[in-house]
Amino acid sequence: FFYRSKRDSGSDKTYNVANRVLFELGSEGLNQSQPLSEAWIAFIEFLNCKEYNQALSDRLEIDLSHCHLEITLKQYSQHDYISSHTDRSWVSATHLFFLNSHWNKSWGGILQFLTDDQAAFFSIPPVFQQSVAFVRSDSSWHEVTPIVHPTEKRLALQVAFWNTLERFVLPGRETNLMD
């Protein structure tokens, strides 16, 4: 099941997005609360293997071997977004896999990387066979622009590499289970 996460205040980051955690922070295996296809299971197992960790560590030039994975399927519908932010210091890196077969930029939902003065310098539409990985820093500003299309859904798989098993939730977050 997806749950909706929403924050309008209480942090520098606001958002509205639906999430389905496939691999929980600190777990040793898949979240079995919902069945997954064999292909999804194989992909999640690959993302949790040493070879993937080492390849991404080499590519990003950062040691991720000490990190704990959290893998979340993110679904954005009309009016969903994530405001400009940098990830918190308890996350070392993030790898996003985009799952839409096609996407029109006019629909919103574009991942944008921003300068410190919030000017977009790199934009990525959420189209299948594209992914982006980045190291967290105080200047790794990014956002997902609001979805404006009334029916299209933006799908992405987020692999977060956490430095800690503790989850710090800042004030203002609301979560609700979705149908």
Image (spheres, rainbow, N blue to C red):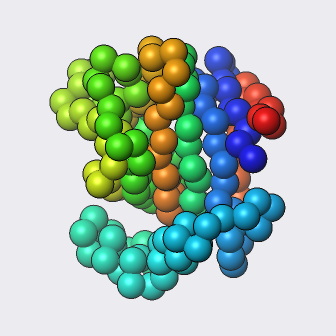
Which residue is more in the foreground, 37 or 43? Answer: 37
Give x and y (percent) for residue 86.
Answer: 43, 38
Q: Residue at x 42, y 48 (%)?
A: 99
Left or right: 36 in relation to 92: right
Which residue is more in the foreground, 83 or 108? Answer: 108
Residue at the farthest bottom position? 50
Q: Quadrant of residue 94?
A: bottom left
Give x and y (percent) for residue 54.
Answer: 36, 80
Left or right: 29 in relation to 75: right
Give x and y (percent) for residue 135.
Answer: 35, 55
Q: Residue at x 68, y 76 (%)?
A: 29
The C terminus is located in which quarter? top right
Q: Residue at x 51, y 15 (%)?
A: 150
Q: Residue at x 73, y 64 (%)?
A: 35
Q: Quadrant of residue 166?
A: bottom right
Left or right: 105 in relation to 79: left
Give x and y (percent) for residue 169.
Answer: 71, 41
In the displayed structure, would residue 148 be above or below residue 16?
A: above
Which residue is more in the foreground, 66 or 79? Answer: 79
Q: Is residue 12 visible?
A: no
Residue at the farthest left position? 121
